[in-house]
Image: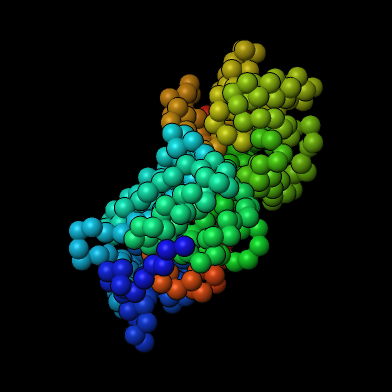
Amino acid sequence: MTDIDFDNFGLLAPMNKDGKKATMTDIAAVVGVSQATVSLVMNNAPTTRISAVTREKVLQVARDLGYEKMHRPDSQGGIVGMLINGLMTSQHSAALIEGARSEAAETDHLLVAVPTFGDPDAEDAAIEYLTSRPLAGIIYTRVITQAIDPPKRLKDIPTVFLNCYPAKGHLASVVPADVAGGFTATWALLEAGHRRVAMINGEEWIEAGRDRETGYRQALATCDIAADPQLIRSGGWTMHSGREQMEALLDLPDRPTAVFCYCDRMALGAYDAIKARNLRIPEDISVIGFDDEVFAKDMDPPLSTVILPHEAMGRWAVTTLLDNASDLTAARKFRKVKMECDLVERASIAPLR
């Protein structure tokens, strides 16, 4: 593997009062918030969940510690490599890539994204290519959130894991908070007065599906509602599956008055099944999805959903990578960071009649 001299890489590292490089971890420790919160503030990412008081406190501590984003004084910049397992044209991939690309550009780095689809030979070839360049580090990315066994060659390369995490060890990684997201989606229906709340879930092997169902069950339990197995349906993550599972729910003697769909595509199918029975959304049945796909706002009625923070996650990954590019041991002290999935309220939820 090509040796990379990070000390002479041209990066201007911020320093704290002890003469050591100040990082977002330092800021988070002083303020008493998560590193993800610091990242969102420092990157000025759009969010309604961070109060003005917390935002100002983070910025003030950053100034006190002398924190500033790393950058190169020359125009050539360095490379941030991204190995991504999935189609780069999908909405989820695009958001992950765009967040990382934007953050890399703001710090005078070039993001080089290489689709490998998890193929070991493709990953090895990509790593070989990237390490022959002035590489700051690698963002190892999966489109589907999951535990992974990282390529052994990444052990000696600064690496952050995006939308995935090593099954063993505590390395810098960031994933969506799917349990909390499932709770948020279900709670929106419960707050509207619904008590017969169903869930159309994805395939059982998908970690996000298991986590979102956990959030669904926790929300029901918060209202002292026992989860009814008849109201939990599992299928694929397609429009067809959503339609099929919604039809099964509508065939129940005591049908649900609201449904939480694992993803917006399944919600699209659920819409078809509901309208085919001459039922109205949201007057007869309220529906909420997950992912905030591009078509969700154009559905009839516009779909309430929960947004995946993929762009903010991409930014966090690059910031964390560059903060710790010269210190592999620091990156190994991290635990998995989970970013909140915010509710997008539209017209598909109504109070129980």
Rendering quarter of residue 205: top right
Instruction: Give percent across and percent down for residue 160.
Output: 49, 59
Residue depicted at x 59% and y 17%: 272
- Horizontal relation, residue 259 to residue 72: left or right: right
- Horizontal relation, residue 197 to residue 60: left or right: right
Residue 35 vertical position relative to residue 49 in the rendered view, above or below: below
| Residue 327 in sight here | yes
Residue 10 vertical position relative to residue 125 in the rendered view, above or below: below
Residue 308 vertical position relative to residue 292 in the rendered view, above or below: below
Instruction: Give percent across and percent down for residue 286.
Output: 59, 29
Residue 119 vertical position relative to residue 317 in the rendered view, above or below: above
Q: Dividing the image into 4 quarters, which one contains the C terminus?
A: top right
Residue depicted at x 43% and y 25%: 298
* Viewer-proximal residue among 79 and 249: 79
Q: Residue furthest left?
A: 74
Instruction: Give percent across and percent down for residue 217.
Output: 71, 46
Residue depicted at x 43% and y 34%: 89
Residue depicted at x 45% and y 37%: 88
